[in-house]
Image (cartoon, helix red, strand yellow):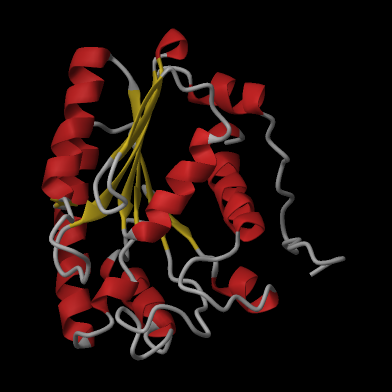
């Protein structure tokens, strides 16, 4: 930490301006699949874009921002079960999200990016449940990357949660390090095609309390993602 700001030791994080983001994401579809932490990422992305079409109804349903003039789509959706939300939850299993990305590539001729996040909704279940879901994700993602070799895939790792909404996190963040280890084990040999976004140290340094990090931390996380997309 430096004057209340997270500064990584081994790289710099660019301060993206809205024009930078739109130029970078031109002719791209970005799909954020996870829990409500992907929804708040979507909200941060929407604030960086001049969306001419926005779908943002119930908080547990999908959200969409489109910039028609630049052929940009940014979508967030709730991952498949398990989830512990309301009857209004609109779950999107990973195969369905990948099917939509294939459509955007083949019919809209866009570059496609997926960010996948599994975390707090798994906290009521044994670690083996999480491992099975991660193993299943690897199988689907390997097939996806064979069909679209230049697709970009990111795994958004867990973050520190000292407190938060008890319904979801009876065990707090105790499973976080174990989840990180499971991702690393189950995706061994695939990390040259998939990027792991590790925010554990960031949220330790910022002393994160809630299940959703504060807005300034969310912005920093999104800037890390954009750094991989735009500067590599």
Compared to residue 153, the image places residue 107 above or below, namely above
Q: Quadrant of residue 174?
A: bottom left
Compared to residue 133, the image places residue 204 above or below, namely below
Q: Is residue 139 left or right of residue 51?
A: left
Q: Is residue 106 left or right of residue 174?
A: left
Residue 197 pos. (x, y %): 49, 58
- As drawn, the residue found furthest toward the top would be 69
Compared to residue 21, the image places residue 68 above or below, namely above
Q: Is residue 194 left or right of residue 186?
A: right
**Residue at (78% x, 62% y) in the render:** 5
Residue 213 pos. (x, y %): 55, 66
Residue 199 pos. (x, y %): 54, 66
**Residue at (68% x, 35% y) in the render:** 16
Residue 167 pos. (x, y %): 30, 81
In the depicted view, which residue is nearer to us: 177 or 10? 177
Q: Quadrant of residue 79?
A: bottom left
In the depicted view, which residue is nearer to us: 145 or 47? 47
**Residue at (13% x, 35% y) in the render:** 99
């Amino acid at each position: 930490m430096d004057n209340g700001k997270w500064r990584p030791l081994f790289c710099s994080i660019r301060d993206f301006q809205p024009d930078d983001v739109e130029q970078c994401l031109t002719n791209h579809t970005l799909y954020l699949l996870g829990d409500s932490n992907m929804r708040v990422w979507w909200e941060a992305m929407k604030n960086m874009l001049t969306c001419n079409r926005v779908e943002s109804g119930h908080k547990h349903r999908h959200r969409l921002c489109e910039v028609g003039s630049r052929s940009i789509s940014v979508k967030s959706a709730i991952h498949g079960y398990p989830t512990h939300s309301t009857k209004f939850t609109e779950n999107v299993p990973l195969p369905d999200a990948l099917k939509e990305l294939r459509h955007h590539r083949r019919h809209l001729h866009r570059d496609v990016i997926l960010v996948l996040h599994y975390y707090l909704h798994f906290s009521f279940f044994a670690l083996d449940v999480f491992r099975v879901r991660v193993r299943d994700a690897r199988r689907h993602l390997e097939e996806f990357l064979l069909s679209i070799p230049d697709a970009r895939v990111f795994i958004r790792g867990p973050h520190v949660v000292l407190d938060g909404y008890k319904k979801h996190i009876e065990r707090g963040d105790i499973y976080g390090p174990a989840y990180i280890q499971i991702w690393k084990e189950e995706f061994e040999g695939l990390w040259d095609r998939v990027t792991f976004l590790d925010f554990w140290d960031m949220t330790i340094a910022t002393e994160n309390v809630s299940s959703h990090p504060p807005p300034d931390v969310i912005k920093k996380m999104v800037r890390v993602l954009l750094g991989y997309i735009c500067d590599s």
